[in-house]
Amino acid sequence: MADRRFCVGYALAPKKQQSFIQDSLVSLAASRGVDLVRIDTDRPLLDQGPFDCILHKFYGEDWRKQLVEFRAKNPNAFILDSPDAIERLHNRISMLQVVSELKIDNPDESFGIPKQIVIYDKETLFDRQAWEGLKFPVIAKPLVADGSAKSHKMALVFNHDCLNKLKPPIVLQEFVNHGGVIFKVYVAGQYVKCVKRKSLPDEPEEKLGNVEGLLSFSQVSNLTTREKTDDKYYKMMQLDDTEMPPLSFVTDIARGLRRSMNLNLFNFDVIRDSKIGTRYLIIDINYFPGYAKMPGYEKVLTDFFCDLAQKKEAVKNSEQETRKIVSDEDDGGLSDDRENKETPVQVQD
């Protein structure tokens, strides 16, 4: 990388750009031969660059078309990530189907997804048969997960009486007590990092039948109207005391998801079932998450970019070697005779 710098063009919404493209990341990447350059989305992509890699969280048919054209002109460049692969994560049902397809051999821990159903209309919402096998409370999430403010509006629903407040299409996911802790697993290529965050507090089994109402997720830190001890719960809960899931276990899941989804930049949310301490449930998967919230994100992303640079250099060297072989064959092997007379050079790995 000392001879040629690796240029990463990024196309991000203003808010995403502000959170991700921080001086600390730009500086560290630059020190290792990686330049982060903003793509002007008001100009044709092919008129800019050259770029070795396109990093984007930008949508629309025009942008998708520009990426196709860029790929045709730059077949060896990286596009992070494919719009078709990203699209799968915009639906909360299809995003978790891949989890059920994973095969990971681990005798000590197991994983899966919570019981869930999708509701497309009000009629199904009040159909008791549609709820068979699903117990309250449930978490109501919009079916569409496109990163918009609307897609983040969720609620904890305690009984059927609150269903009329929900607006389909929605996904209803059975709430599982998990110690009030959620594990967020960040993935950037082969790099995997797991952090723990506070989550919804557990619901005592004996109170589940007596709790009424609907609780918006935006009100999680203000639960005193429902349970006076919840604020104390959060203040007393020490995340340092929470045991992390085995890193090898979450790494295996992360790499399995990466291969199945054909994505390089994502994170997934995991909870540990309080009843079965070795049972983990994946409840959400997000494309290009808020990496800046992850401690040391600058090094993780820079290492990832450097890996891409090395891969591209390896492809370039391979193509040059192929051309050389073809050339040697075309001149009847005369170049071999010339090379044999030259002093050999040893290449260090």
Image: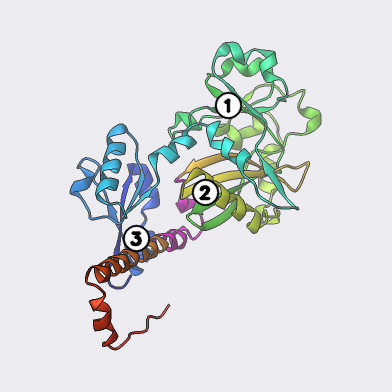
- Residue at x-position 71% and y-position 44%: 179
Quadrant the C terminus occupies = bottom left
Give the number of callouts: 3
- The mark nearer the N terminus, 1 or 2, is 1
- Crowdedness near tag 1: few (<14), some (14–19) or many (≥20) residues, C-alpha within 10 Å: many
- Crowdedness near tag 2: few (<14), some (14–19) or many (≥20) residues, C-alpha within 10 Å: few
The residue stretch that appears in magenta = 288-305
Q: Tell me the CA gap for discs 1 and 2.
A: 26 Å
Q: Which residue is mark 2?
A: 259
Q: Which residue is mark 1?
A: 171
Report which quarter residue 228 is drawn in.
top right
Amino acid of disc 1: Val
Q: Tell me the CA gap for discs 3 and 2.
A: 28 Å
The secondary element bearing badge 2 is classed as: helix
Q: Which residue is mark 3?
A: 26
Colour basis? rainbow
Magenta residue check for 290: yes
